[in-house]
Amino acid sequence: MTRSPSDTAAAELAPSPREPLRLQVLTALALHRMATTGQLRQMLRPDGTRQLLSRVLNKLRTTGLVDLTPLPDANRSRTHAWYLTPEGARVTRDLPVLRGRPPYPITSTTAASLKTPHTLTVVRTHLTFAADARRLGHEHGPWDWTPEVAHSIGEAERLVADAVMHYTVVDGEHRRKLRAFVEIDRTTMSSERLAVKLIEYARLFHYEAQPVGRRRPVSTGPVWLRWYPVFPRVLFILTGASRSRLEGRINDLQAMTAQHPLVAALAREVQLAASVLEDIEEHSPSAPVWVPLAGGEPRPWTDL
């Protein structure tokens, strides 16, 4: 019986000691949506060479599983962002790390180019945390960062976090598991719209779904308990503007935290903080560069 090209491609994705990197690249692109060659190297083979990743990507492109779009920066005309083709998305949809995740296929170069700036900034942020975890001996890898996570907040509305981060602090035999909703702000929306995201997180914190058919309200507990043992902290990471403008946006987040009753209630239970992307890249996420939105001195995100 002759196998179809897609069946052949799926069979070739089975992990093996000889070519595990091909599977890892496809998994990374399926989870993170898009990445440059350099980002994939930092993510999957931080001690490897760019040429190693380039060979794997070019072979995957030849087999029709990935494609690329040039970055808009004219000074970096030879840099591209890679993404899965529809066939690549189909082949990877049943990978264990992607189970339960809705597909977000990018079906054309045009669609890819529209998503490039934000998606690559989200990957850039993840890599900063991953590098810091390696340096400190903590645990945070490519599959511990899930982009575009949606939760219902009632009234047919959804909150979509830019990413959910899982991170394990390792101190000798002591392990502390941390989770965070991550919001990336490239200063492309108004400061007020950014601050409104805090209201959405407060609604998620308080939202309790009602069983179908019940006439009287019956408490089933907060919906978020289906996925998290404790409500993740909320981290805003800002970039794309002058220092004074970014500081102003952080001030607006603090004002929303102080003035909105639902957000103030959230802040009493959940750690909320903001930082500038360039600061966490220069000093590391574990440096005291996070401004608590409820007030206080800057501190590491793990010590909020």
Image (tube, rainbow, N blue to C red):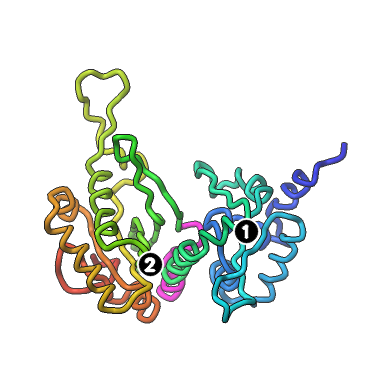
Q: Which mark is residue 262?
A: none
Residue contact between numbered discs 2 and 1, judged by CB atoms under 8 Å: no
In the rendered image, the vertical position of residue 249 relative to residue 260, given as above or below: below
Q: In which quarter of the image is residue 130?
A: bottom left
Residue 151 included in the magenta stretch of the image: no
Q: Which one is nearer the viewer's eye here, 139 or 119?
A: 119
Point 71% across, 56% down: residue: 16
Counting from the top left corner in percent of width and height, residue 108 is at 63, 54
Judging from the image, what secondary structure is the residue with disc 2 in? Answer: loop
Q: Quadrant of residue 204?
A: top left
Q: Which mark is residue 109?
A: 1
Measure the C-alpha gap from mark 2 to mark 1.
Answer: 22 Å
Counting from the top left corner in percent of width and height, residue 229 is at 31, 46
Point 30% across, 70% down: residue: 275
**Position of 113 compared to 5: left or right?**
left
Point 36% across, 75% down: residue: 280
Counting from the top left corner in percent of width and height, residue 30 is at 57, 53
What segment carries the magenta color? Answer: 131-144
- Quadrant including the N terminus: top right
Label 2 sits on residue: 186
Instruction: Count the labels in the image.
Output: 2
In the rendered image, the vertical position of residue 152 relative to residue 299, given as above or below: above
Counting from the top left corner in percent of width and height, residue 221 is at 25, 35
Q: Work out whether residue 83 can be spotted.
A: yes
Dot 2 or dot 1, earlier in sequence: 1
Q: Which one is nearer the viewer's eye here, 261 or 220?
A: 261
Q: Which one is nearer the viewer's eye here, 10 or 20?
A: 10
Residue 133 included in the magenta stretch of the image: yes
Amino acid type assigned to the residue bearing label 2 in the image: Arg
Amino acid type assigned to the residue bearing label 1 in the image: Thr
How dense is the environment of label 2, judged by Cα within 10 Å: few (below 14), some, or many (20 and up)? some
